Image (cartoon, rainbow, N blue to C red):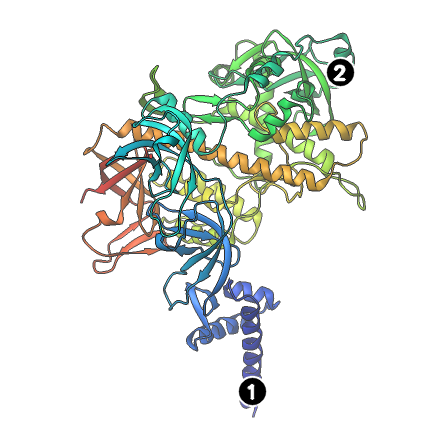
Amino acid sequence: MVKKTSKHKISRAKKDIRNQILGIFSNNTLKTFNYKQIARRLDVTDPSSRKLITVVLNELEHDGHLTEVQRGKYKLKSRGGYVCGIVQMIRSGAAFIITEDVAEDVYVSSRNLNHAFSGDKVKVYLYARKKGDRLMGEITQILEQKDRSFVGTIGFSSGYYFLFSDNKDMPQDILIDPKMLNGAKPGQKAVVKITDWPAGAKNPFGEVVDVLGDAGDNETEMHAIMAEFQLPVKFSPELEKAAAAIPGQITAEDIEARRDFRKIPTLTIDPADAKDFDDALSIQKMENGNWEVGVHIADVSHYVQSYSKLDKDAFERGTSVYLVDRVVPMLPERLSNDLCSLRPNEDKLCFSAVFEMKENASIVSQWFGKTIIHSDRRFDYAEAQGIIEGKEGDLSEQILKMHELASILRQKRFNKGAFSFDRAEVKFRLDDRGTPLGIYFKTAMEANWLIEEFMLLANKKVAQKIGRVSKGAVAKTFVYRIHDRPDPDKLANFSNFVHRFGYSLRTNNDQAIAASMNALVKEIKGKDEQYILEKLAIRTMAKAKYSCKNIGHYGLAFQYYTHFTSPIRRYPDLMVHRLLEQYLAGEKSYNSGKCEAKCEYASSREELAVNAERASVKYKQVEFLQDKIGEVFEGIISGVSEWGFYVELAENHCEGMVPVRELDDDFYEYDETNYCLVGMRTRRMYSIGQKVDIKILSANLAKRQLDFGIVK
């Protein structure tokens, strides 16, 4: 009798959960869920009910109501439908549609793109699919069109002029009427804008809007990269004239309105090749035995007035761009390298964050405001590192004390859950023409950490000053640098992957994730898998961005964080300076809608700049290896996709692809969860982190692409 009642109760509970689960999927027809997500939605916490959810999900999949799109992740069985998303082209000419309407990207073949390009917002019809098939669709409408300008090389064949685009977003040649060449010649790099693409035509038609120079010339290629990402290369004569007209003299009124730090020991520490110095540090011992540390930032807002021509241009640029061989600054040289550069032995106007600190680096008091400083010495990182190690040299007492305080701040930050990724930076030795002669790696030293910790402290405390308010009060609109928590699925996949190397990762809470991630970084240091595992760990993280909606900075473990310390090269920092000045003066809050729109734009400009920087590195890597065709190198698999896998060479970190077509010993399937390609017949596996020997097959400078072949 008891058993019968128990079975009846289980059956009824199962039926209830089944109906509730079907309801969740029916109301979210395009989303995927695993059992944990379902349990959270149903507010189920006890182990027996959670186990029942797993059983019901399996049954619903077996009965044809759900489809298992990945192991343990289910979706209502697709019967077609529409989604909207952003096009992301791939090198084959096909594309993926990135959309929030479904949990996985939608694959669209080249014949179903209907003249859409990367960055376009489109409407996609989803095809019904069988279990195990990927989600596929067809673009039916372009909702928002991205700019149709492309960079490439002018060609001539069979009586036709055309542009062979450098960009994978444009797999077709663009035909050009001779009247539309605007002086461009075959073999030259140019920017071409599409003017027409008739329905049914294989190729679009376009006109040359800018001639960049001869293909292969370093100056031309760097300008081509900037043009590809729609980043300006130079300043107009009008802007240069406006910058030149700014008076450089510091008046008595300027000094009177500022706190004077000119007699306090002050220094800058920057890279050896730096031309602009936007931050300086001062330190002095106070009568009470504490230390006063000043973080002094160039007062760009004093020289660049809101809504001026210089301000509008800086906003449009958003950031300085750091290519392999140059910096394309956000502000004209008169500002970035002269008026706002904290050069030694010159009085300079600053906006400062000043801290009274105990010997244990705890903050006793803080002050923010306009200052005037006089830097006593300019150090590069190597010089400062020499003083830290040798304990002697110019201003050694000040540098050693700041190093001591910074080391304590750094350890406190890690103890609170900040991440520690100190990856080597790839650098090139270039000749006078920009040709790469060799590759070397720059690693952060204690001198770098010294500067980093005080910049982080200033950024955090400025954000706290405005963002942290008493209970019931409303914080004023401000610019924050935010960093969201990692995606749980990516984190779970990474945890499973590192387990294969014999490591473990705890993911039960934020502090556990940070602690075990930092322990992993220490454990793998110097091992073959270090570079790849660190790279994958970073990929699991969300991207940092600017926003007026503060959610904290996960990677730094800061509840409040902003960018205050580089207004010469980042427009959001200039916004922060202006807002901070206004609020310190008691002015009302800035319009939040306008602020958020500016933050979104700044984030998009930052992403373009980062992509341009990566493209310049990739170009130099290909250029460096183009005379090594046929040579064999040892590498490690750094990424896997369905069209091949990427290999990073051990000796120089150059990366190329082994296309699937080169794996002629079997038919290979892509296993996304385990980051690998698996042979259907041989079960041979190519997985991230695996060592391989490769031969360089080709080096395409125009496409910035290296193709490798496996040496069996």
Position of the C terminus, as image quadrant, is: top left
**Rendering coords of residue 322 (x, y %):** 47, 26
In the displayed structure, 607 sits above or below 296; it is below
In the rendered view, does 467 fall on the left or right side of 80? right
**Residue 372 vs residue 514: left or right?**
right
Query: What numbered label is drawn on residue 258?
Result: 2
Q: Observer-nearest residue: 7 or 475?
A: 475
For the N terminus, the image quarter is bottom right
Q: Earlier in the sequence, mark 2 or mark 1?
A: 1
Instruction: Where is residue 353? Give x, y as percent.
Output: 69, 24
Q: Quadrant of residue 298?
A: top right
Residue beneath the point at 63% across and 27% down: 312
Q: Amino acid at mark 2?
A: Arg
247 in relation to 192, above or below:
above
Residue at image x 53%, y 9%? 393
**Neighbour tally class for label 1: few under 14, some 14-19, many 20 plus, Cα within 10 Å:** few
Q: Nearer the viewer, residue 610 or 38?
A: 610
Question: Which residue is identified by label 1?
Answer: 8
Task: Name the residue: 36% across, 33% down.
Answer: 152
Furthest residue toward front: 179
Task: Please say if 548 is above or below 273.
Answer: below
Cα gap from disc 2 to disc 1, whole angstroms: 80 Å
Q: Position of residue 63 (x, y in %)?
A: 43, 78
- Name the spot of residue 160 as percent of width and height, x first: 29, 36
Give the structural element (helix, strand or loop) at label 1: helix
Dot 2: what SS?
Answer: loop
Q: Quadrant of residue 639?
A: top left
Nearest to the observer: residue 584 or residue 446 = 584
Q: Amino acid at mark 1?
A: His
Q: Which of the two discs, 2 and 1, sits closer to the camera?
A: 2
